[in-house]
Image (tube, helix red, strand yellow):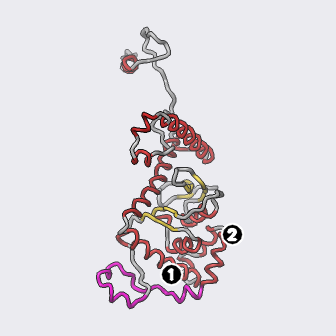
Amino acid sequence: MRTDHSVRYGGRGVMIDWHVERKATCIHSLLKTCTSSEVAAMIEGVLRHCRDMSVQRQYVDSHGQSEVGFAFSHLFGFRLLPRLKDIAGQRLSLPDAAMGAQLPNLAPVLAQRAIRWELISQQDEQMVKYAALRLGLAEPESVLRRFSQANAQHPTYAAFKELGRAIKSIFPCEYLPDEGLRREIHEGLNVVETWNSTNSFIFYGKAGEISVLSLHLLQNCLADVNTLMLQTVLSDERWRKKMTAEDWRALNPLIYHHVNPYAVFRLEAGVDRHDPTETDASEVQSAGTRQIPAG
């Protein structure tokens, strides 16, 4: 796959879309170009993660959602839960234009027109047809490519937009008053941030030029080793008694602060030591501050 320029991140490269389960296990990865649809990649991972699990909720950032994305998510039976950075700029679409007069306090955030339910009803069969990509009949990227601003006059695209407007209008009404939902979305996305942070840690050499397959393998190995280490530590009753509910909730196999990716280099200070296999702090400091004569 050739690289292309990323408007979002700057520079040239490719994009890798990761789908990470709540316990920090990657269930799907997809290599794609920087100009491909992130909404399509989101749908691809939900439908084709090749696991026995059934995805009920999908957490994404602002780039992983759209009105069409909300519509497809609704038809596929999973809930799209984005963290919208412009939540204050969202507009609510009313089911009936007459309701606007009954909600004067919401006037600043109401859309200019109500949802066109008749269009959704007219295109119902066509929408279900395009949703057949769940059966593997089409790639999400190829389907969603037809539903872009370039094809704004496409009646089925317009119907998907209307359905998406309805579902997306419901989301802020649930998100803003429900602290539990907001926490759930942030916790879900923090798992992904932890995953990305671990990726950056593994990418310590030469600007992160490493095979994607090698990266996935290294992540799995790190998670496996950390799981065994945590099991060993927590098998001691003394440590288990020290754990609080928040400590248990924060356990994650993708920790790396105890790992030294550069290996260990022992400095010889040129002094006698009791144990030739160990170097204490004073010897390291002495070796690191030795003056070398000029010339």
- Reading the image, the residue beneath label 2 is 135
Q: Quadrant of residue 257?
A: top left
Residue 115 part of the magenta-drawn span: yes
Camera-near label (2 vs 1) is 2
State yes or no: discs 2 and 1 in contact (Cβ < 8 Å).
no
| Outermost left residue | 105
Q: Please, what secondary structure does the residue beneath circle 1 have?
A: helix
**What is the quadrant of the N terminus in the image?**
bottom right
Query: Counting other residues with Cα less than 10 Å from the Cα at mark 1, is it few (<14), some (14-19), or many (20 or more)?
Result: many
The answer for how far apart the CA atoms under marks 2 and 1 are is 24 Å
Left-right relation of 249 to 177: right
Q: Quick check: can you spot residue 269? A: yes
Which residue is painted at 49% across and 24% down in the image? 265
In the rendered view, tell whether residue 221 sits above or below residue 9: above
Which residue is painted at 57% across and 55% down in the image? 16
Q: Quadrant of residue 18?
A: bottom right
**Image x and y of residue 215, in percent:** 58, 45
Predominant SS along the magenta part: helix
Which residue is painted at 41% across and 65% down in the image? 84
**Image x and y of residue 118, in percent:** 53, 89
Residue 108 part of the magenta-drawn span: yes
In the rendered view, tell whether residue 280 sits above or below residue 232: above
- Reading the image, the residue beneath label 1 is 162
* Amino acid bearing label 2: Leu
Q: Quick check: can you spot residue 15? A: no
Residue range in magenta is: 96-123
Observer-nearest residue: 122 or 148?
122
